[in-house]
Every structure is written in structure tokens, then in C-alpha cells.
Image (cartoon, rainbow, N blue to C red):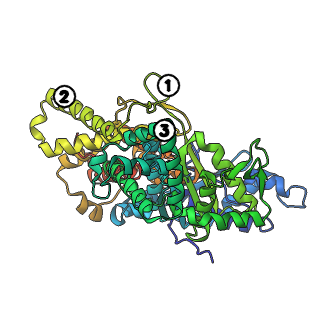
Amino acid sequence: QEQEPAVGAGSVKQQLSRLVISSLRATVPEVEVEPMVEVSAKFADYQCNNAMGLWSKIKGSGTSFKNPNAIGQAIAKNLPSSDIIESTSVAGPGFVNITLSNRWVAKKIQDMLVNGINTWAPILPVKRAVIDFSSPNIAKEMHVGHLRSTIIGDTLARMFEFSNVNVLRRNHVGDWGTQFGMLIEYLFEKFPNWQEIGSQAIGDLQIFYKASKHRFDNDQEFKERAQQGVVRLQGGEEKYREAWKKICDISRSEFDLVYKRLNVELEEMGESFYNPYIPQVLAELSSKGLIQESEGAQVIFIEGYQIPLIVVKRDGGFNYASTDLAALWYRLNVEKAEWIIYVTDVGQQQHFEMFFNAAKMAGWLPDPKEKKYPKTSHVGFGLVLGSDGKRFRTRSTEVVRLVELLDEAKSRSKSELLQRLTENGKIVDWTDEELEQTSEAVGYGAVKYADLKNNRLTNYTFSFEQMLSDKYAHARICSIIRKSNKDVEELKMSGAISLDHPDERVLGLYLIRFAEVVEEACTNLLPNVVCEYLYNLSEMFTKFYTNCQVVGSPEETSRLLLCQATAVVMRQCFQLLGITPVYKL
Ligand code: ARG
């Protein structure tokens, strides 16, 4: 049973949509249509665009409406009275222009200051989502692509969580597969006392991996032992399980260093977790007639693809695809997720398309024409390019240490900050702790922001030189408020906001669009929408601040509250992007 959202809940667009729905029911009770409410750039604040579509549905059916404009007039007239709308007008083929009431906008902002930004969360159509992100491979590598997945996935999770969705943050680590035979046998060989050693003894796991691979490729006897090792591990032999666990633990503590720096939370549920479910899941697919034999392997043929999806290899082993099918089954049936989102580079797009299709053929996912959820999405991002324009990746001899990369970001931002503070003589105002924290916030922030601000589908060039003007904007607002020597916590209870100046109104309208922006970013899985909003907001703030005197003006209280509201919204944007704001720069 769907509950009606509370009055005032959701984004402005959602609130207006509810008014439009009741108007549509009164205007054309005979047809069911979705409300079409958009932001209007020119003629008003918002606009309702339903009239034309309705006209093409009902013309010739004996309707009393003469043209789309008449429908638009009726939609405008039938809008329930509300304190949101100041006025409406109807243009051309029935566009209903809606101008919001200044008083309502001002009150909405003030209510947010009093009750918190959480009251501005959009309403999303799902209650629980899985976000599968980061997902590096044990003992292999955690490369820049995994870093990108970590940052984008974390931001998506933050946006859904803010929107009151229960998010299962899943780290689908590659902790299963044939490479473990080789790793385990090499561990036994190199460290006869392997049970006692700590992670430092092994040192760099990637080097360990390469050495064992070298052994595997060049020594037939070792190779055979490694191949038997996989069988013994998968057969559950105690000693092998223990060695496997040891290797995973070491990898995990390396990954955790990166997550800790980035302040990202994740729950590890690796490939091994789903392994026991594979046989029953494949049995189900087989009973539905989906699985065939092809060249000794078990495969699923999928329309539109030249090659089939292999689910059991020729040697009888399971693979990436069989694991993903079992994981999807688990997420749908046990975890009851309504939206399952995977974040990897676009190189894996075909894998995801194919196994999503297999799931549709199995009837696990509804026909999107009938029901939208549950659904799956692959969030693919472009490659990271080095400054030479080529793919930024680990060369086999070289280990990219993400931790070092983050250290470098911090030290660069620190030297820039020091230089600037020395130049303008402000260095005396800063404590060492403030310097540390700010360089960390700016440095890590720059790495994240560089990842998120691009439309994720395009490649981008990795560079430390992209700085954060928005951080400056936020710090500047904080300093304006500090210098006013007024207590905004007290003002927000006693004072009032008014939006009489055009630049105040533009800023106010943009502030209340916040929920819409988060809604759009979640719906289309595009975090860069939030970055753009943050950028535009700081531009609008600058315009307002240039044209409207704040401190010492008759409107001081109202304008300080607008400053404060802008800072609160900016901070929430930073929070969604996983970036620590700075209060002083
Ligand atoms: N471990 C994989 C890789 O490094 C990514 C896993 C993504 N998630 C998934 N369910 N397939 O490429």
C-alpha cells in the first residue's frame, strides 16, 4: 500500500507535481497521465507541459476542449489553491507557467535552517538498493579504476542514503578463482611458518603475486601442485582454507588503508560468498531451458550477441558470470533489493548487459514496460588517462600505490596553501593542526572532485592541477558570517528571510532546487549533476553578494540567513560528494 507523501515533502518539482496531478484529474478525468513539471528558464520559475500531449490523446474523441491552449487554461484553473504558487499564465500550445510565491520560498529556506537539511530530501521510488562498488581483486591490484569506482560508488551511496534509501554497500572483491592455488602453494614454499607471519613479512602482495606467477609459468611441477591446490581449496581442506584466509586478510588490510583515507565505508561480500549458491542458481536457469552446451562449456545464448555467456567453463569451473548471476539472485531474493547498481569501468559493459539479459530471460527482472522495479544498472565510467594521453595503468613491473597517490595530493595542496598564506601574510593565523586538516580536505577533495565533476562517461586526464573554487566560495561565506559578529543560530529563530531583490530571489529559487538536483543525480546515476549545482550555486552567491550589501544593510538579518542557507546547502553537497568542507582558506 503506497502512502501519500506528507504535505511539503519531496522536491519542489514533486510538490508541484502533486498539485498538477489533482488538476489533471479534475480537467481530464477520462485519461491517466503522468504530471510533466519542469524548471522553466525564461518565462517563469516552473512550467507544466501536459497540455499538448493530452490534446493529441483526446482530440477527435468528442472533447469539449477546442485546442491545447484551452486544456492549458483548464489545468491552470484547476490547480488546487496552495501557498506555493504566486501566479500562473498560459502560453502558446498550453504551457502553464508557474511563478512561485516569494513568501513560500523564503519560508521554505527558513524552515530548512530551523529543522535541518534532511527535511529537503527527495522522495525516491525505492526503499532498498545494493551498490556494488570498489571491488578490487585479492593479491592482484587495486588500481586507479578501482579508486574511481570507490569514489563514484560512495557518492551514489551517499545520495541514496540522504534520500532515505537503505543502501547495502557491497565490496564484491575478487577473492575466489584459480589464482589461489598458485598463491597458496607459493606461500607454503616461501614461508614454511606461514601461520605465524604477519602481513609485513610478505610485504607487497602484488610482488608476491608476480613472483608466484613467475614460478607457475616456469616450473611444471609447481604448476601441477598449484592446480591441485585449487581443487583442495575448493574441496574445503582446512589448511588451504586457512592459507586462503591469510592472503585475503593481508589484501584487505591494504585496501582498508585506502578506504580509511577516503572515508569510505563498504561491506565486503566477495565472490567466495556467492560460490555456494551457484549450483542451485544454475539449476534454476537450466530448468528454465536457458543453459546449453557449447564446445564443452555450459552457456546461455543471448539475442543480439555473437558470443554466448559462459556460465560453466570447459574444465567444469565456475567463472565471473556464474558468480554474478548467483550474486544477483541473492540480492533480489534474500536481500530484497529493488535497485542493484554496479560501478566499474565501461570495459565491462558487455558482461553486465549480457548477464542482465540472462536475468530477464529467467524472469527475475520484470518487463520494464510493466513494472520499473526491481532493476539493475551498470554505472560505467571512462578510463583514466595519464598526462601522456594514454591509459593510466599499472605497468607490470610497477606498482601504483594508491596510498602514495593520496599522499601526493595532500602534500601538493599543503605547499600551495603555505605559499598563498605566506604571500598574503596570513600564515600567523593558522595552527599546525588547521594546516594539516585543510591540506588533507583540499587534497583528497581534489582527487574526488576530479573524478566526480566530469560526466562519468567521458575519459578524463588525471591531473592534480584542478582546484576547488567551490571550496573557496564556502570558506568565504563562513568568513562573511564570522565577521558579521552575529549569531545566526539565534537569528534563524527570530529573524525572517525576504527575497525582494532580484538576485536574492534567484539565489533563493536555486537553493530550493537542491532536492530536485539530488533526485536527478540518483535517478540518472550521475554525481556530476551535484558538482554542477554546487558550482552554479557559488556563482549565484557571488552575484548576490556583489549586488546586495549584507553586513550593515537594513536587510542584514535576512541576508545573513541567506548566506547561512547557502553555506548549509553547500556543505550538504560536499557531504554527498564525500568531500570535507573547509571553513577557512
Ligand atoms: N573485481 C572486478 C574487477 O576488478 C570488479 C567486480 C565488479 N562487480 C561485480 N559484481 N562484477 O574488475
Disc 3 target residue? 219
How dense is the environment of label 3, judged by Cα within 10 Å: few (below 14), some, or many (20 and up)? few
SS class, disc 2: helix
Mark 1–mark 2 distance (CA, rounded to whole Å):
32 Å
Query: Going 43% across and 24% down the picture, which residue do you hit?
Result: 387
Count all numbered tags in the image, as a single digit.
Answer: 3
| Relative image position of residue 357 (x, y in whole percent) | 71, 53
How dense is the environment of label 2, judged by Cα within 10 Å: few (below 14), some, or many (20 and up)? few
Disc 2 target residue? 419
| Relative image position of residue 459 (x, y in whole percent) | 52, 32
Mark 2–mark 3 distance (CA, rounded to whole Å):
56 Å
Residue found at the very far front of the displayed protein: 221
Residue found at the very far left of the displayed protein: 428
SS class, disc 3: loop
Residue found at the very far bottom of the displayed protein: 1
Q: Nearer the viewer, residue 531 or 43?
A: 531
542 versus 570 height, above or below: above
Residue type indicated by callout 3: Asp
Disc 1 target residue? 390
Mark 2 or mark 3, whichever is nearer to me: 3
**In the rendered structure, which disc, 3 or 1, sits on the residue that comes first in sequence?**
3
430 versus 102 height, above or below: above
| Relative image position of residue 46 (x, y in whole percent) | 58, 51
Q: Are marks 1 and 2 in contact (CB under 8 Å)?
A: no
445 versus 121 height, above or below: above
